[in-house]
Image (tube, rainbow, N blue to C red):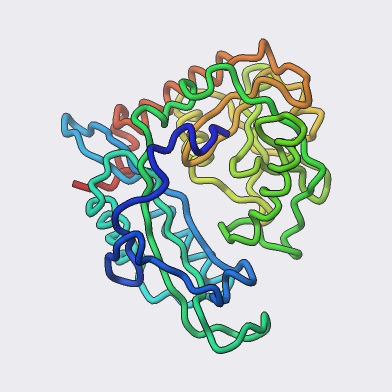
């Protein structure tokens, strides 16, 4: 994906929302004995807010906020983490955090976790949780992934495999799932690649380090189907909706590694970078090594949608100011 440092305007903000109140960045602390720090049981979301114009009115909007918070709630239920705030309260807290920091274009991270407790045993149910929300500024125009990566990513298929759902649920954003992304990312970096794809326990294409995967073959858009062992990305869902409205044939089905390598076009989707083309996989060029025609046209339609240029998608926007 687009490297975090290439799109972030800073890696801190002035205020963090923490359990119902706004505190200064330096005061948003977690104790070294925090239970979630030891056992990787925390649920988080990655959400975008950016400028858009709806009906002639310019504002900063949070994109698909309700969908993100519903996924956060689903993760909390799955891992039985008490959530003290309603969805409506969390949505208001997200908007309040962006507004208090005076941000126009940002990446928002709510995270639900267990703090310090009297036991550090992994089999002890933790009765209390903490919810924090912070927002990091994004460079103007950085959401246009084609500008950030005009040529495309150099990718590899990692040796690390996504486990099955009965080993570790992959359909929520739990911190435990991203240890695998970290290992695969290290592997890619050492081998000289920008990014890595992960196969699942069956040897089929699952997802990227923090993204969903799409290929184009003979003008048809194909992506692996949603399953409990992969994260059904909200950007993925948005891209599919726009593609279908644009009349692009879409198919959600199992995808083999060979199909990925031999695709006419490949791109990945994620909250921070939207759509990013893939130039080659394992040294083998994809198409001509640049953003393909279907990807480019879909990307343009998607950017129109998330910029407020298509009234049909205004339901995805929550105003900040």
Identify the image quadrant of the N terminus: top right
Q: Position of residue 165 (x, y in %)?
A: 72, 60
Q: Position of residue 72 (x, y in %)?
A: 47, 61
Look at the picture and state if 256 lies above or below 168: above
- Residue at figure coordinates x 30%, y 27% from the top left: 309
User: Looking at the image, which is closer to me, 12 or 239?
Assistant: 12
**Residue ranking furthest to the top:** 288
- Residue at figure coordinates x 40%, y 45% from the top left: 107
- Residue at figure coordinates x 56%, y 57% from the top left: 173
Q: Position of residue 251 (x, y in %)?
A: 64, 33
Look at the picture and state if 95 lies above or below 148: below
Q: Position of residue 55 (x, y in %)?
A: 19, 32
On screen, residue 140 versus residue 272, left or right, reads left
User: Looking at the image, which is closer to me, 219 or 256?
Assistant: 256
Image quadrant assignment for residue 269: top right
**Residue ranking furthest to the front:** 26
Image quadrant assignment for residue 178: bottom right
On screen, residue 38 versus residue 280, left or right, reads left
On screen, residue 136 versus residue 249, left or right, reads left
Image quadrant assignment for residue 285: top right
On screen, residue 73 versus residue 151, left or right, reads left
Look at the picture and state if 272 lies above or below 126: above
What is the total number of numbered labels drawn onto the structure image?
A: 0
- Residue at figure coordinates x 75%, y 65% from the top left: 166
């Amino acid at each position: 994906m687009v490297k975090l440092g290439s799109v972030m305007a800073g890696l801190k903000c002035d205020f963090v929302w923490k359990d119902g109140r706004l505190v200064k960045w330096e005061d948003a602390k977690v104790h070294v004995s925090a239970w979630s720090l030891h056992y990787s049981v925390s649920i988080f979301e990655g959400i975008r807010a950016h400028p858009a114009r709806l009906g002639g009115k310019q504002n900063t909007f949070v994109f698909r906020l309700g969908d993100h918070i519903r996924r956060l709630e689903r993760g909390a239920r799955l891992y039985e983490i008490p959530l003290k705030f309603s969805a409506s309260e969390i949505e208001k807290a997200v908007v309040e955090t962006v507004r208090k920091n005076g941000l126009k274009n940002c990446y928002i991270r709510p995270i639900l976790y267990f703090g310090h407790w009297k036991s550090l045993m992994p089999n002890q149910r933790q009765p209390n949780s903490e919810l924090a929300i912070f927002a990091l500024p994004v460079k103007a125009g950085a959401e246009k992934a084609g500008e950030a990566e005009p040529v495309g990513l150099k990718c590899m298929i990692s040796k690390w495999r996504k486990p099955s759902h009965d080993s570790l649920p992959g359909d929520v954003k739990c911190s435990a799932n991203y240890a695998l992304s970290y290992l695969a990312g290290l592997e890619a970096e050492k081998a000289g690649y920008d990014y890595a794809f992960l196969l699942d326990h069956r040897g089929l294409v699952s997802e990227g380090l923090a993204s969903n995967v799409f290929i184009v073959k003979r003008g048809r858009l194909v992506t692996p189907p949603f399953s409990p062992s992969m994260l059904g990305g909200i950007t993925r869902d948005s891209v599919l909706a726009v593609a279908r409205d644009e009349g692009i044939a879409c198919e959600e089905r199992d995808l083999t590694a060979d199909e990925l390598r031999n695709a006419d076009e490949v791109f990945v989707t994620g909250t921070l970078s939207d759509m990013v083309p893939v130039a080659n996989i394992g040294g083998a060029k994809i198409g001509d090594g640049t953003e393909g025609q279907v990807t480019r046209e879909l990307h343009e339609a998607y950017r129109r949608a998330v910029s407020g240029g298509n009234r049909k998608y205004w339901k995805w926007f929550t105003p900040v100011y």
